[in-house]
Image (cartoon, rainbow, N blue to C red):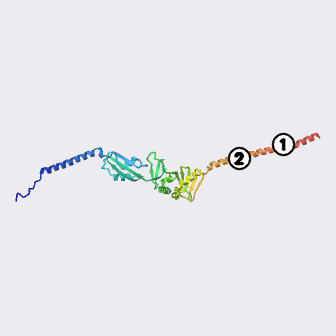
């Protein structure tokens, strides 16, 4: 019976100890590699790329992101950078992505601007849909929107205008260079728009969504009829009239011409009177001369 029982092998203590040694060496080398990696430039941010900004400078965005080259790549939180950059007034949304090794990309989406204005210190300012003002810090930015002039600082109609412009395609205002208020008793929200094609357009903020989509075609029809420049009125009806002449210059010219004409007329009348007197005197002398000669003969 004893010969039939299987022999149970005892575990080899050397095999278990060799596994522990291999595990220890593996952990050691992994730790060593991690230490070397985090000490190398591969674990740090080497490039920060900012895209999509137009009115905000890259320096301002980088300052808000609070990230700089040399920071640890894995310790930078993308969501934190997004929230910090989004806190800027002009920024609508932000997308932050990390590309290994060492590249951080910040994609900025700004609020749409509807117009510009010149600030009190002469600096160009951008106006958003809610008429909030953002200083333009980027040098050489193209003024691709109309410039608002003559508007009071806290005018509610300016807010209404910016809101109306934000709801219209930007192409509607491609020919408009300037917009100024021109209120009347009948139309308190009346405005004047000056186009690059040398037209003055008079309408109201309320009529803006309805009339702007026809402005380009209206100007094109005028130009095809050889009518350049003038005042386009777009209220209940759309009409065109030529520019009025300078009344001051016209009056001065008329006054001068009238005075010269009057003086010439008066001079002519005086001359005529003198001529008539001389003619009368000559006639009297001629009549008396024969009478004198007759008396002498007698």
In the rendered image, the residue lying farthest to the right is: 298
Q: Is residue 33 left or right of residue 17?
A: right
Would you identify the image quadrant in which residue 36 lies?
Answer: top left
Residue 56 at what x, y percent from top left? 42, 49
Identify which residue is drawn at 55% across, 52% down: 220
- Which quadrant of the rendered structure holds the N terminus? bottom left
Q: Is residue 270 left or right of residue 288?
A: left
> Is 265 or 96 nearer to us in this picture?
96
Q: Is residue 203 visible?
A: yes
Answer with mark 1 or mark 2, whichever residue precedes in sequence: 2
Classify mark 2: helix, strand or loop.
Answer: helix
How far is disc 1 from disc 2 in space, using C-alphas?
A: 31 Å
Residue 151 at what x, y percent from top left? 51, 53
Q: Is residue 153 left or right of residue 100?
A: right
Image mark for residue 282: 1
Residue 281 at what x, y percent from top left? 83, 43
């Amino acid at each position: 019976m004893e010969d039939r029982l299987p022999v149970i092998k005892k575990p080899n203590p050397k095999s278990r100890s060799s596994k522990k040694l291999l595990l220890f060496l593996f952990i050691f080398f992994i730790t060593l590699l991690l230490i070397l990696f985090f000490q190398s430039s591969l674990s740090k941010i080497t490039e920060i790329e900012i895209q999509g900004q137009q009115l905000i400078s890259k320096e301002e965005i980088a300052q808000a992101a609070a990230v700089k080259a040399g920071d640890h790549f894995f310790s930078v939180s993308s969501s934190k950078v997004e929230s910090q950059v989004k806190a800027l007034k002009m920024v609508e949304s932000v997308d932050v992505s990390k590309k290994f090794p060492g590249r951080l990309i910040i994609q900025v989406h700004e609020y749409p601007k509807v117009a510009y204005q010149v600030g009190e210190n002469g600096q160009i300012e951008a106006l958003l849909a809610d008429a909030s003002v953002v200083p333009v810090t980027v040098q050489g930015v193209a003024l691709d929107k109309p410039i608002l002039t003559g508007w009071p600082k806290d005018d509610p109609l300016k807010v209404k205008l910016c809101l109306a412009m934000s709801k219209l395609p930007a192409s509607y205002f491609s020919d408009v260079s300037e917009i100024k208020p021109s209120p009347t008793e009948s139309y308190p929200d009346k405005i004047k728009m000056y186009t690059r094609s040398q037209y003055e357009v008079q309408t109201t903020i309320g009529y803006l969504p309805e009339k702007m989509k026809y402005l380009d075609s209206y100007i094109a029809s005028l130009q095809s009829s050889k009518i350049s420049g003038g005042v386009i009125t777009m209220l209940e009806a759309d009409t065109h009239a030529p520019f009025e002449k300078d009344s001051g210059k016209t009056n001065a010219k008329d006054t001068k011409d009238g005075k010269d004409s009057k003086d010439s007329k008066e001079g002519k009348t005086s001359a005529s009177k003198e001529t008539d007197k001389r003619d009368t005197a000559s006639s009297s002398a001629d009549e008396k001369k024969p009478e004198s000669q007759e008396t002498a003969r007698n």
